[in-house]
Image: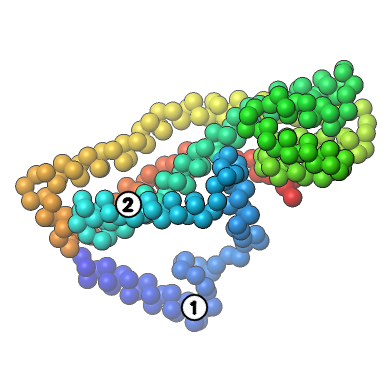
């Protein structure tokens, strides 16, 4: 088994060396690296944390928690299996917990905000239509009575409006703080109506609210159909872990885990279990609406 792994590693190294020299490929993939139009920057990390409601969390604190969990997971893996390979695999899996937790908080926060937007758009439609209020005043009044997740962004936009009375700049602040596709569409609709005027704002806001309601209902139906699959996904981790603990308590199971062949077997098993866990989560992930009006 060890000789096979060494042979595969050597063959992979020869492949990377040949493609780098002869074909000019870069990276460690099995094809030429595709240049992306936009790289992930630290601004994206800040926006991601903001969407999760963690504006007070610094990037360094986030990565410090990831590193700490890697060490803790590696220590647990080494104590259980007695080898560095399973420890590294478990440490890497444990270090993904903060990312998964923040992603869950981000999705829950965005879900609550998306459910509130149709009602807020309808209120703005009523205030700008039958009540005759101006667009900025209607927007800030609705924002003050909106969900707690959205109020800080509306307060920041209101401060910008009071200081500058520049509605485009105010909308830029609101879109940056909310970082939500529905908010982008609503802000752009209000901005165009404020700058150009016209009598069709009521119709546009009504169509936007109806579109958001339809999207929310479709996502709820999809999540309801996935409930059984999400519950079954737990067994991807629970069953193999229980079998591993049972194997350690039978005969010389612990010593078998610490042998070279046992270490490689445990590593392959952990990689397959963790890979199935992430693959199942990726398959069941609902597509997110892309932001088309971001700054």
Tell me the number on the disc at residue 72.
2
The answer to whether residue 103 is seen in the rendering is: yes
The residue furthest top is 130
- The figure's colour scheme reads rainbow
Q: Residue at x 26, y 61 (%)?
A: 84
Query: Quick check: 248 left or right of 25?
Result: left
How busy is the neighbourhood of tag 1: few (under 14 within 10 Å), some, or many (20 plus)? some
Q: Quadrant of residue 204?
A: top right
How busy is the neighbourhood of tag 2: few (under 14 within 10 Å), some, or many (20 plus)? some
Query: Quick check: 171 left or right of 234?
Result: right
Query: Quick check: 259 left or right of 174?
Result: left
Q: Closer to the camera, 99 or 63? A: 63
Gap in Å between the C-alphas at discs 2 and 1? 37 Å
Tell me the number on the disc at residue 142.
none
Q: Secondary structure at mark 1?
A: helix
Residue 161 lies, in percent from the top left, at 83, 39
Q: Which residue is mark 1?
A: 20
Residue 247 lies, in percent from the top left, at 14, 45
Q: Closer to the camera, 148 or 282? A: 148
Q: Residue at x 71, y 45 (%)?
A: 176
Q: Residue at x 63, y 29 (%)?
A: 148
Q: Mark 2, mark 1: which one is toward the viewer?
A: 2
* First of labels 2, 1 by sequence position: 1
The residue furthest bottom is 21
Q: Secondary structure at mark 2?
A: helix
Residue 17 lies, in percent from the top left, at 43, 79
Q: Quadrant of residue 86?
A: bottom left
Q: Residue at x 38, y 53 (%)?
A: 68
Q: Closer to the camera, 282 or 195? A: 195
């Amino acid at each position: 088994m060890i000789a096979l792994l060494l042979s595969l590693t050597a063959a992979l190294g020869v492949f990377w060396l040949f493609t780098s020299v002869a074909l000019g490929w870069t990276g460690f993939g099995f094809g030429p690296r595709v240049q992306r139009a936009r790289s992930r920057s630290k601004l994206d990390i800040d926006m991601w944390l903001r969407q999760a409601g963690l504006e007070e969390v610094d990037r360094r604190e986030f990565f410090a928690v990831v590193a700490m969990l890697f060490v803790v997971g590696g220590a647990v893996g080494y104590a259980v299996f007695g080898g560095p390979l399973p420890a590294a695999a478990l440490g890497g899996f444990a270090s993904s917990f903060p990312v998964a937790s923040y992603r869950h908080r981000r999705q829950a926060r965005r879900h609550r905000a998306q459910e509130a937007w149709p009602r807020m758009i309808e209120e703005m439609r009523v205030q700008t239509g039958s009540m005759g209020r101006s667009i900025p005043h209607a927007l800030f009044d609705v924002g003050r009575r909106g969900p707690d997740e959205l109020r800080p962004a509306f307060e920041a936009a209101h401060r910008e409006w009071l200081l500058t009375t520049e509605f485009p700049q105010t909308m830029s602040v609101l879109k940056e703080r909310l970082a939500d596709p529905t908010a982008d569409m609503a802000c752009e609709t209000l901005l165009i109506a404020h700058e150009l005027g016209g009598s069709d704002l009521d119709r546009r806001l009504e169509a936007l609210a109806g579109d958001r309601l339809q999207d929310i209902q479709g996502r709820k139906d999809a999540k309801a159909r996935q409930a059984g699959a999400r519950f079954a996904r737990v067994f991807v981790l629970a069953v193999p872990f229980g079998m591993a603990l049972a194997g350690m308590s039978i005969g010389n199971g612990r010593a078998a885990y610490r042998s070279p062949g046992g270490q490689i077997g445990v590593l392959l098993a952990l990689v397959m279990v963790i890979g199935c866990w992430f693959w199942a989560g990726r398959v069941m992930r609902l597509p997110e609406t892309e932001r088309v009006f971001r700054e």
